[in-house]
Amino acid sequence: MNDVIIDIRNLSKSFGSNQVLHNIDFTVQASQVVVVIGPSGSGKSTFLRCMNGLETAEGGTLLACGHTVVENGRMMSETRLDALRSEVGMVFQSFNLFPHLSVLDNITMAPRALRNTPRQQANEQGMRLLEKVGLAHKADVFPGTLSGGQKQRVAIARALAMDPKVMLFDEPTSALDPELVGEVLQVMQTLAAEGMTMIIVTHEMGFAREVADLVVVMDKGAIVEAAPPAQLFTAPKETRTRSFLQSVLVREGSPVQGCEPAIGSGR
Amino acid sequence: MDLDFSPVWDGWRALASGTLITLEITAAALVLGCVLGLLIGLGRLNPKRRLIYGFCTTYLTLVRGTPLLVQLFILFFGLPHFGIQLPAYVCGIFGLGIYSAAYVSEIVRGSIQSVEKGQMEAARSLGLPYKMAMRKVVLPQAFVRMIPALGNEFIALIKNSALVSLLTIADVMHEGEKIISVSYRSLEVYLAIAFIYLVLTGTTTLILRRTEKMLRADGRV
């Protein structure tokens, strides 16, 4: 548990004159499941995308999987970023499956192209991953024929095909119909149970409470509070955490047990 | 008014060989236009690479902004002043190809940029370098989207190829003019030529439509 997978010091990032990340410090240990929550526009996704270099940060230091992604505001070269990215899996809100490739080819493309894995071996691994996400019977179809939940499960399998050391999830269930959310969360829960290091941006509070080791609340580009779910959901320290949880849980209409006193009291 | 198509029938060999020349020149120009157009289009994707972007944009401005006929005449009558004497046939292919490339490049750029940003991001996040992501993920999708616009461009190219008859190339237009000059049956010959072009462009449309349908099958793209 003591391997540091991601180590972030003083990270900042701006889009033009608009600073979206303010001096963030953050560490993720191996096998830790971190859930990032917060109001929209709080910089959660940008923060996540910095971790595999999809966004360039211009201040601070970011280490991921032993690679220095950002050092004192300087990004590492594109070539070295490619090496890092093959060790960091990413799952997107809008799935981004490759529509011109079959489901199996979506999964095997990267290992075959980047690691020269022979087709047969890649296919075997692909089928194992598809079984894991419960979609082995869809190997030969094209993504256009899948439901949203199935697409996202394939996207998870695709990311796993590179044997990543850490998985980043950027609102993986936000684009799904409500009845399809469960199947995706279940796959993620299995992954977490297997010891995968995961950083998840989500609005699924129930999932955060059940699966996360650490819940991070972001607001206005800064980390407001970070605590284990039991503590964060029952006794949040910060006012901004409380007001955010209140708005979310009221909207969900079913405040989860243990949460009510802290939020209901509105101290 | 009586129409007399007999000069057309009598001259069918000349028209057929002219059609063949038209096809050859158009096909060669099409390949040149596509290859060059792909490169120019890729070069205009990133304005931050100033030199490449600047070169490609200048190319587009010059070639798209001047008449094809003038470009052909510059190649054919102008280059010899610099001691470069290209055969008419080569001038025709280069002239048409260079001209077509300008239009193809915009089709290429537009189609590539119409592929969702998430596709490139997903490919890059798996560790694929930019060029590999472009080749394996973005271009195959962009290609299917190019087809309708490329179809228009190919048809324009076939029709524009009639201009090379003015460079002494014996294309179908040129052969037709020769028949007119001895038979004075201009309407009939021009109608015949129009029909031949219609068959060529119609066939192109059909082939492209089939290709697109095939590529879009199975619910992909």
Image: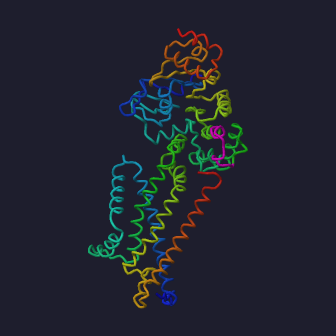
Residue A97, image quadrant? top right
Residue depicted at x 43% and y 36%: A76
In the image, taking residue A195 as reference, residue B145 lies left or right, namely left
| Res A168 visible | no
Q: How many marks overall? A: 0
Residue B66, image quadrant? bottom left
Of helix, strand and loop, which mostly describes the magenta segment?
Answer: helix
Q: Up-down: is B189 above or below A171?
A: below
Q: Nearer the viewer, residue A3 or A171?
A: A171
Residue range highlighted in magenta: A140-152
Quadrant in which the N terminus of chain A appears: top right
Q: Position of residue A126 (x, y in %)?
A: 67, 43
Q: Nearer the viewer, residue A118 or B95?
A: B95
Let me know if residue A130 is in the magenta part: no
Residue furthest toward the front?
B1
The colouring scheme, among rainbow, by chain, secondary structure or one colour, is rainbow
Residue furthest toward the right?
A137
Q: Position of residue B173 (x, y in %)?
A: 43, 80
Q: Up-down: is A168 above or below A24?
A: below
In the image, taking residue A263 as reference, residue B50 lies left or right, namely left
Q: Nearer the viewer, residue A12 or B104?
A: B104
Residue depicted at x 63% and y 44%: A107
Q: Position of residue A138 (x, y in %)?
A: 70, 45
Q: Position of residue B29 (x, y in %)?
A: 44, 69
| Res A20 visible | yes
Q: Up-down: is A250 above or below A63?
A: above
